[in-house]
């Protein structure tokens, strides 16, 4: 057994990672440190290889040792002596990328049967393109780019790396003649037609690879055997054609990416058109709930997220529940649920069914997440209001402290004193202001408490579980189907039943009482906060006005010779007209209203306490 082999330097052979025509890749691990290395060596003797094979082997090792790029697998020196290594055949020691290759780890997953999510696709494209451009800058073509030759490394961050440069070739005067290498699904036409080629052959392969990343299928007749007929179709495609597929016995070419995919639309151009929500009524946030500001910078430049949340003035309510956008292929599957259907057609139906379920589960998750974001936005507004309120209350407290000193002075005057009567009007207004501020603060604290409870309630919601379970069952059906013979027919009844169950569950969850209650409470709290903000704005204004009036009174006390008509007969001033008007509003709308509200709240509290005592 390979696991029993241990070198003299405490390196142990764990397993065979892979094997090819004449190469084998072994996984070695250090017994003490656990460090792992992938070692590629030739499983044949030098004399058993043809001259071309000998040259290819030496060429790969030579090229790999000269490269240094974060997205090309790193080579290392062999830290111990290997046995059974042929003479004149160097070994290739590489970092071990433990996550596996792109095909097995990502593309073969049912959830990715219609392509991977946009942000992940962009990451893979960016990193692999960077590696290929690096090779080209060193006059090297890879010539065998495919998902199996891209591995995932997970050290500090997940990264994607190129491996297997066995077909790589340095471009020079003697290397421009074509030789058929690599996998035909990804190989460039220049190599198929035996023409001369350049580094452009890698860009063709990248295009095929990237198309498969975003759609889940290869672009050019992926189910057709690689015969001369297949090659002829590829040769005759127009320059702008980016895919070819068979439909009803005909080969159809297209110039756009085939749906369905997870690619997003242009948000800024379509958002108002699609939603009928005017820009002035839009609230946009990123995935962290951070509001995107309205300024000269584009929305896209303000965040790295690929998902935005749109609210109509902070409202989460879905007025019209959107109808299910069922793919045409799924509709056909439902109609033909009792028919025997060939493998490729059924596979296409299942792909679209899983894509449909994936999108709906994701949308529902985002909807629930949007509720939390809206509650967080409300929490931010509450915090901002609390900060402004505390600042105003500090000013109000400072005012009442100052007024208290002059109140004592005027209270020592006789009750019939003219100055005392005039000042009493001012003192009463300040008292009303303080009472109003206290009542608003009590109401605000109640609102803040309700918001905290709402946040906890929203976090405990689990409305996606049932949909997710149905989605998992659909994936299981798809995986079991893929194990069947491609020459076998089958009925899609199990998948159709799951689609109907998914539809029914979605309808139930969209009308979930917990969600409706949370939305109602969000709207109620938003309305309550808006009213508090408007009314407390008057308190802020009144505080500033009463400070000005206090300053006039203080100045009059310091300069008795000034006219009393200006300082004490305040009812004749323009300022007092404003104050008197605002004062009536405060008394009617703040003090009385919030005293009643708080009294009712206290009565309800006492009532519940009495009921509990009776029990």
Image (cartoon, rainbow, N blue to C red):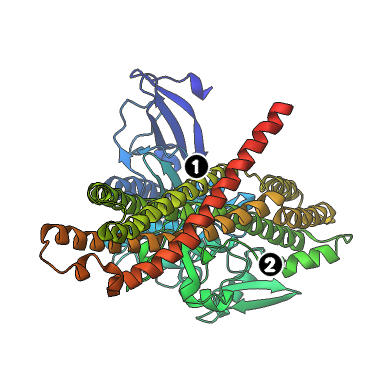
* Mark 1 lies on residue: 100
CA–CA distance between discs 1 and 2? 40 Å
Q: Does residue 269 show up?
A: yes
* Percent position of residue 45, x then y: 43, 36
Quadrant location of residue 302? bottom left
Horizontal side of residue 163 vs 457, given as left or right: left
Quadrant location of residue 436? bottom left
Horizontal side of residue 606 vs 78, given as left or right: right
In this rendering, the answer to whether 552 lies above or below 596 is below
Q: How packed is label 1: few (under 14 Cα within 10 Å), some, or many (20 or more)?
A: some
Q: Does residue 169 show up?
A: no
Work out whether residue 374 or residue 130 is closer to the camera in this orientation and state it. 374
* Percent position of residue 60, x then y: 36, 48
Q: Which quadrant of the rendered structure holds the C terminus?
A: top right
* Mark 2 lies on residue: 322
Task: Please name the residue shown 45% across and 59% down the image.
Answer: 286
Say what secondary structure mark 1 lies in. Answer: loop
* Percent position of residue 490, x then y: 83, 55
């Amino acid at each position: 057994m390979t696991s029993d082999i241990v070198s003299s330097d405490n390196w142990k052979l764990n397993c065979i990672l892979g094997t090819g025509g004449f190469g084998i890749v072994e996984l070695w691990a250090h017994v003490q440190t656990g460090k792992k290395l992938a070692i590629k060596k030739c499983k044949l003797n030098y004399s058993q290889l043809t001259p071309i094979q000998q040259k290819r082997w030496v060429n790969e090792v030579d090229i790999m040792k000269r490269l240094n790029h974060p997205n090309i697998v790193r080579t290392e020196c062999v830290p111990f002596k290997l046995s059974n290594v042929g003479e004149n055949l160097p070994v290739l020691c590489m970092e071990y990328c433990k996550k596996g290759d792109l095909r097995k780890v990502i593309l073969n997953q049912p959830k990715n049967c219609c392509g991977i999510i946009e942000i992940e696709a962009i990451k893979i494209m960016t990193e692999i393109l960077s590696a290929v451009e690096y090779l080209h800058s060193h006059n090297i073509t890879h010539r065998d780019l495919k998902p199996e030759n891209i591995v995932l490394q997970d050290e500090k961050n997940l990264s994607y790396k190129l491996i297997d440069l066995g077909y790589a070739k340095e471009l020079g005067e003697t290397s421009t003649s074509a030789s058929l290498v690599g996998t035909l699904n990804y190989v460039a036409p220049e190599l198929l037609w035996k023409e001369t080629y350049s580094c452009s052959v890698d860009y063709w392969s990248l295009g095929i690879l990237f198309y498969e990343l975003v759609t889940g299928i290869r672009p050019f007749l992926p189910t057709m055997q690689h015969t001369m007929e297949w090659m002829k179709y590829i040769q005759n495609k127009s320059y702008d054609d980016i895919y070819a597929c068979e439909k009803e016995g005909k080969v159809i070419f297209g110039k756009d990416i085939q749906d369905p995919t997870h690619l997003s639309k242009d948000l800024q151009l379509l958002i108002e058109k699609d939603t009928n929500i005017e820009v002035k009524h839009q609230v946009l946030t990123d995935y962290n709930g951070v509001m995107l500001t309205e300024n000269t910078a584009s929305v896209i430049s303000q965040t790295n997220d690929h998902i935005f949340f749109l609210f109509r003035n902070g409202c989460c309510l879905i007025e019209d529940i959107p109808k299910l956008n069922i793919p045409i292929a799924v509709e056909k599957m439902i109609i033909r649920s009792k028919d025997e259907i060939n493998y490729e057609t059924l596979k296409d139906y299942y792909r679209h069914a899983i894509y449909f379920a994936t999108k709906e589960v994701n949308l529902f998750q985002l909807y629930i997440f949007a509720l939390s974001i809206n509650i967080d936005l409300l929490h931010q507004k509450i915090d901002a209001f609390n900060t402004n309120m505390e600042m105003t209350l500090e000013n109000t407290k400072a005012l009442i402290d100052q007024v208290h000193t002059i109140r004592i002075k005027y209270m020592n005057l006789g009750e019939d004193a003219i100055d005392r009567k005039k000042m009493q009007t001012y003192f009463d207004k300040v008292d009303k202001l303080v009472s109003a501020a206290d009542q608003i603060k009590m109401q605000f604290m109640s609102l803040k408490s309700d918001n905290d409870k709402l946040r906890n309630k929203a976090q405990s919601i689990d409305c996606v579980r049932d949909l997710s379970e149905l989605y998992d069952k659909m994936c299981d059906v798809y995986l079991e189907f893929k194990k069947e013979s491609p020459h076998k027919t089958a009925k899609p009844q199990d998948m159709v039943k799951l689609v109907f169950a998914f539809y029914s569950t979605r309808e139930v969850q969209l009308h979930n009482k917990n969600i409706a209650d949370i939305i109602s409470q969000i709207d109620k709290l938003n309305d309550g906060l808006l009213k508090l903000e408007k009314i407390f704005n008057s308190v802020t204004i009144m505080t500033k006005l009463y400070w000005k009036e206090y300053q006039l009174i203080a100045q009059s006390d310091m300069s008795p010779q000034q006219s009393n008509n200006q300082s004490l007969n305040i009812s004749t001033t323009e300022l007092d007209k404003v104050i008197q008007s605002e004062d009536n509003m405060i008394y009617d709308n703040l003090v009385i209203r919030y005293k009643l509200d708080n009294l009712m709240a206290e009565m309800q509290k006492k009532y519940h306490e009495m009921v509990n005592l009776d029990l």
